[in-house]
Amino acid sequence: MPNTASQLNPIQLAHAYAVCRGIARRAAKNFYFSFLVLPKEKRDAICAVYAFMRHADDITDETSVACDERRQKLALWLQSAKQVFEGTISDDPVLYALADAQQRFGIPADLFDQLVSGTAMDLEPDRYSQFQTFEDLYRYCYYVASVVGLVCIRIFGYRDPKAEGFAERLGIAFQLTNVIRDVKEDAALGRIYIPQEDLAKFKLDTTNSLPTPAQARDLLEFEVQRARGFYAAAADLLPLIDIDSRPALWALVTIYRKLLEKIAERNYDVFTRRVSLSFSEKFAVLVRAWFARIFVRPLTA
């Protein structure tokens, strides 16, 4: 029989969640700011999911290890998660906390398969370091970002199944924002995520070098407009999730949208220096989200 919250040792569970919170605080950056305004039980669950994904990412990023061995490690990590979902008690604090979160919030186990599948895509550079069409990029974005959203809304809470479609679109919007912001860094790693059909449309060739900011401007404006379209298509998600989770989702969306608009404000120059929000900009978003949570005020962009 699967574990339930009552079957797990509360002292061990508190320690396990503390470990997960520490991992999220160190590594989650934009996500962690939004986690802070969730109720504690939901915040802990999100941190457990994040810690699980972070370890999967760390396995994938272990470039000193052969790809086949990394795939084996990922498979073992996923297998270990499935075992705790089925009732095995783990001494790994991340898996211990994850077992509780998965049962407490009814997260479908198959979503964790998809999470790991998304991580494993980076181990197939011949297939996933370059995309011919936007449909190809969409599939990649779905696995590396939309699935995360589908897990998160289980924790946030919702009743209307339409929320799942909106969460998928929001994940696409987030990942497109990352793709646009990280063009320079990804190219240095041999990854060109902008679809080749888009590059051809704007008569750009990245075979030997990146275009200049001036050359890439129209292309990146096009990509920003596409991302805006996905944010707009996901706008109805916020009122569909439980009211105590809305400030956190609002904060996350606001941070990412501000990042996208900052790219536009810089005339789409993502080459000269990396575009990011300052601590004070993120803190201002967090304060407004806290205010909304305390006083149950509606939030708008």
Image (cartoon, grey):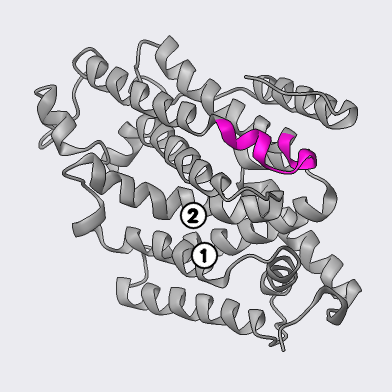
Q: Position of residue 146 (x, y in %)?
A: 47, 49
**Res 175 → quadrant:** top left
Mark 2 closeness class: few <14, some 14–19, many ≥20 residues within 10 Å: many
Screen quadrant of the N terminus: bottom right
Residue 111: give its label.
1
Q: Examine the rendered structure and indicate whether residue 281 appears above or below residue 106.
A: above
Most foreground residue, 182 or 85: 85
Screen quadrant of the C terminus: top right
Q: Is residue 82 left or right of residue 19?
A: left
Give the main secondary structure of the magenta stretch: helix
Residue beneath disc 2: 147
* Residue at (72, 81) in percent of width and height: 91
Q: Is residue 51 left or right of residue 201?
A: right
Q: Residue 151 lies in magenta, yes or no?
A: no
Q: Which residues, given as a range, are shown in magenta?
A: 236-246
* Residue at (68, 68) in percent of width and height: 102
Q: Position of residue 65 (x, y in %)?
A: 37, 71
Residue 168: give its label.
none
Tag 2's secondary structure?
helix
Q: Examine the rendered structure and indicate whether residue 19 appears above or below residue 191.
A: below
Contact between marks 1 and 2 (CB within 8 A): the answer is yes
